[in-house]
Image (cartoon, grey):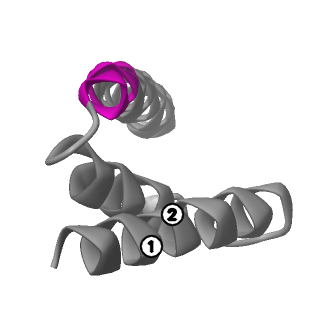
Amino acid sequence: MKALRLTFGALLLISGIILTLLPGSILLVISGLVLLSYDWPRARGWLKISQKSMAYGAKKLDRFMLMRKLKKF
């Protein structure tokens, strides 16, 4: 079971990185890191970093959209 989880997690991570470089979704990277974080402590650190950067990006986008909406009035 551990080998299957590590293999599937690595495949998701690699395909997520490729799709992030091409127009795609970063959700595959996150899901791959979640699977890898069960068995690999270093992946937990990468997962925390990616979650923090995604939260920061969402806050920045929300702020931008709010300012854009307020300029219309």
Which label sits on residue 27?
none
Please state which of residues 59 and 39 is positioned toward the viewer in this rendering: 39
Q: Nearer the viewer, residue 50 or 65?
A: 50
Tell me the kind of residue under disc 1. Thr
- In the rendered image, the residue lying farthest to the right is 22
Membership of 66 in magenta stretch: no
Work out how far the residue at label 1 is from the one at label 2, CA to CA, in angstroms.
Answer: 5 Å
Residue located at (83% from left, 56% from top): 21
| Picture quadrant where residue 73 is located | top left
- Which residues fall within the magenta stretch? 41-49
Q: Is residue 68 left or right of residue 27?
A: right
Give 11 or 51, whichever is nearer the viewer. Answer: 11
Which residue is rendered at x = 66% and y = 72% of the image? 15
- The quadrant of the picture occupied by the N terminus is bottom left
Height in image: 57 above or below 21?
Answer: above
**Relative horizontal placement of residue 10, taking residue 40 as reference (left or right):** right
The residue identified by callout 1 is 7
Q: Are marks 1 and 2 in contact (CB under 8 Å)?
A: yes
Q: Position of residue 40 (x, y in %)?
A: 28, 36
Dot 2 lies on which element?
A: helix
